[in-house]
Amino acid sequence: MYDFAYQKPGSVADAVKALAADPEAKALAGGMTLIPVLKQRLNHPSVVVDLAKTGLSGITAGAGSVTIGAMTTHAAVAASAEVRRIIPALAALAGGIGDEQVRHRGTIGGSLANDDPAADYPAAALALGATITTNKRAIAADDFFQGMFTTALEADEIITSVTFPAPAAANYQKFRNPASRYAIVGVFVARFPAGVRVAVTGAGQGGVFRHAAMEAALSANFSPDAIAAVTTPAGDMNSDIHASAEYRAHLVGVMARRAVAAAS
Amino acid sequence: MGHEGIGASVRRKEDLRFLNGRGHYTDDMNRPGQLYAYIRRSDRPHARLGAIDTAAAKASPGVVAVFTGADMAAEGIGGLPCGWQIHNKDGSPMAEPPHPVLATGKVRHVGDPVAVVIAQTRQQAKDAAEKLAIDYHDLPGAAGLREALAPGAAPVHDEVQGNLCYDWHIGDKAMVDAAFAGAAKVVKLELENNRLIPNAMEPRAAVGDFDPMSGDYTLITTSQNPHVIRLLMGAFVLHIPENHLRVIAPDVGGGFGSKIYHYAEEAIVTWAAGKLKRAVKWTAERTESFMSDAHGRDHISTAELALDKDGHFLALRVSTLANMGAYLSTFAPCVPTYLYATLLAGVYKTPAIYAEVKAVFTNSVPVDAYRGAGRPEATFLLERLVDVAARETGIDRVEIRRRNFIPNDAFPYQTPVALQYDSGDYTATLNAALKAADYAGFESRRAAARARGKLRGIGVSTYLEACGIAPSAVVGSLGARAGLYECANIRVHPTGSVTVFTGAHSHGQGHETTFAQLVHEQLGVPLDQIEVVHGDTNRIPFGMGTYGSRSLAVGGSAMVKAMDKIIAKGKKIAAHLMEASVEDVEFKDGTFTVAGTDKSKTLTDISLTAYVPHNYPIEELEPGLEETAFYDPKNFTYPGGCHVAEVEIDPETGVTSVVNFTAVDDVGRVINPMIVEGQVQGGVAQGIGQALLEHAVYDSAGQLLSGSMMDYTMPRADNLPNITVGTESTLCTHNPLGVKGCGEVGAIGSPPAVMNAVVDALREYDVRHIDMPATAPKIWSIIQAGRPRMAAE
């Protein structure tokens, strides 16, 4: 990796100050994306601002919701009794990210801020209608994700926590890339009294997206059969050496049906 | 001596240091004042090289030197040699264009080394390498076989128009054509053998050093065969006499063939150490390994089988295109010829076989031997073809194999493609595998899977391979530029402990254990008093290293010969001490006795006498107890067996899972059953990887798309079933141990077993053949094509 300066501020305010001071500064959460990118010399920040000491980890159960600090690791979410009680599908998703080493370093805030089109957490945040809280404001998940690797975050804005409302039922099904084990298609289905939300990661050209046709069908009838005939336009899907757009579109249906069956 | 000798599952002695992180690998080795090399590689598949501006790199912090191909050429550095010359059908030699250490004139594949930067630290070298300004003039490139052979394709080497390295053949074409003309049935199959990237756990590394006082060079390298590297690099590239060049291959973390070859980086660090009078280290990054380690396989073939009305094979005709990559790697030419076409008889008594092979230069990483080397390609072709023949003649898949097996009374059996098999019992391994796999009970498992919505299939492969490539005189006549014997030096120390100096090299195989078991068996020395030394040209006699499952069959046989000499000398010393005649002295379990008396002397008594020769037949016998033997095999060995794979396919996603795998192999005499089981399991894991997961993919221009672990699918534990391993052995008839070899059988026998199972699972979709890897989208597409589209779509 290239040389860079390194700072480890002791508060969110100091971290924001450091990021605001330098347009080439980069925030470091768990580093599960940033560190490999630095090692491959694909990025050359002037300063890396490590958020490890900003006091952003921890899980709090609320009335009908759970709030997770941005620096909470995937392993902590997967093991949390509160998360497992309130939103078991979210704990299961966290427990299926990467491998054991990644889960003990990677954080929920880092994952959401990075918005990798094949990451798992964006599907959960979008399907559950999470609220992403930053040092400045609260952002609804529907407004947060703005295309692959693009979010509503401003340069000097740091995610501090994420609040997930508890669904009546939810499930996440992931079809992994056989090599990287990232999602080729991941579908998170969440049923609320007001209706069903379906979010798809890994597949879309624009990153994570909500599947309106499936949501309408499942809100009327929450069963796999209800979406058996719902198709996903292949034209909006990614295509690479691992999966064609047509195959991804097909898998969206398969994973969605399996998620509904598991959540029913 | 049963519990620690031949046949005992002794725990691997070397694992103590490996499992405790105390191995000594090349990158662990550091020399005083050591510098670091970073190699700038071509990111272009094919380009003419213009000027290389090194000024900024040379001025970069910490940089000691920058060298390009022109610098090496100016000093008369030779190109990397090829160790095997194939002749064309017309008798002319193959095209053998130069393989410069650093590119000159052109770059020919992504990863081709262009310049080396040597600096105080690795980071500084890498920083400086980015400052090299390289003037490329892009040329059209082709990494694929068909594209490189297409009319008008750009020549990879200007002097090889048409990109044809050789056009070779074997067998009696007229006899084969006549058999086809009279055949009741002809089955034809086109197939591809997917390109693989070896990915040993330890990346390649090399440390060069030079002592200006003595003029001695040292190269520490991740090699399977240090003497071969010393010979090739010393004699052909750097022109360093053997007495001034020491090559050390310490602990090596896996090779699978990819560490046989003499690579550019070895020559670069050794030469640079001499120029700079300082040690120079290079260690590959994983991404670098993907584009600089020799790849494996990559064939396109047409195969035809002629049968009589009863399903007996009459003749086999094969035409193969084999990808050589951009340059000829050390043993590349022999892989698709003498390690491939000679194996096309398999376990069958097919009376006539003809094969022609065109080897092709492409803008891709050089291709050479990878675990199995030619034999997996032959086995995949043959065992797929036999399954298709069964399907198209209506004869059961197992029955058609039985009907065509070489019978047990036919050995030694001369095939129509040069090899003579010494022993085997193909019915025995087939029967044992079918029993262990509960083949008879499969249909009920298929039905149960069906009820769960899964498509279940079973596949069988009855394979044969050839190990311990030999004899030297024969391989020499076939184009090898090296001998293929092995050496052993056995040193019995004064107090009876033993050091074995072997030319074989262990990079995961467990030689320190297996070889010690041989010594224990023959000399009766306890295992903890036996040390096995390998991998250092200054310590061991000239040896050829380890590949092709040769270490026990060839290296072990050399040890037996050396120990025979030890015993013979020991008997003379014992006869002197016990005042008996040599003919009356017997040796067993570490003790010399005189027949018909109670006189005895231990090996320790004898060794002590040999080194303290006070009471010693000094007039007739030299002191000391140390013997060297070289063993040149009389023939290949021929392991074989039967693999049975059972798969389940999820028809919704196309995902294939191997749910059961059974391997029953004839590997000859088994020295350590636990190590054999581990070797077979590892090989099967790689075979399942080839069948379902692994694929080196280039785009049409020659960019490597599967250039990292993010895109190249290595098999992982959750891709593999429990693998049931059995042995059903016949003994090799021509080496003293009766051993055949087990290192590659798993990778050779398993891919067609898996693919036969996949095709079987999809039988309702009328599938005739599927090329590897059977990825989920590929299987899904087949299922989609075989199913009427629903109106809603």
Image (cartoon, coloured by chain):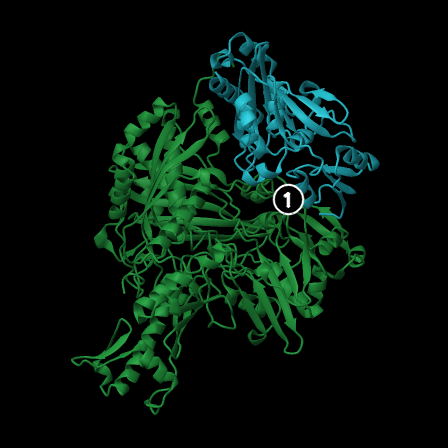
Chain colours: A cyan, B green
Q: Nearer the viewer, residue B215 or A81?
A: A81
Q: Residue at x 36, y 60 (%)?
A: B636
Any part of residue A247 in sight: no
Q: Is residue A28 above or below residue B609?
A: above
Which of the 4 quarters of the picture holds residue B787? Answer: top left
Residue at 40%, 45% (x, y): give it: B684
The local secondary structure at tag 1 comes to loop
Q: Which subunit holds the residue at mark 1?
A: B
Closest to the observer: A125 or B511? A125
Q: Residue furthest bottom?
A: B619
Q: Is residue B41 visible?
A: yes
Between B393 and A196, the one lying in front of the other is A196
The residue that label 1 is drawn on is: B141
As drawn, the residue found furthest toward the top would be: A220
Q: Local crowd at mark 1 within 10 Å, few (<14), some, or many (≥20)? A: many
Residue shown at the point (27%, 54%) measured from the top left: B729
Q: Amino acid at mark 1?
A: Gly
Quadrant occupied by the N terminus of chain B = bottom left
Q: How many marks?
A: 1
- In the image, residue B549 lies at what x, y percent? 40, 57
Q: Position of residue B343 (x, y in %)?
A: 38, 51
Nearest the eye: B744 or A132: A132
Residue B270 image offset from top left, x and y in percent:
63, 66
Please, is residue A219 above or below residue A186 in the view? above
Q: Position of residue B576 (x, y in %)?
A: 27, 87
Q: Is residue B440 left or right of residue B221?
A: left
The residue sitting at the left extreme is B596
Q: Is residue A109 above or below residue B473?
A: above
Image-quadrant location for residue B630: bottom left
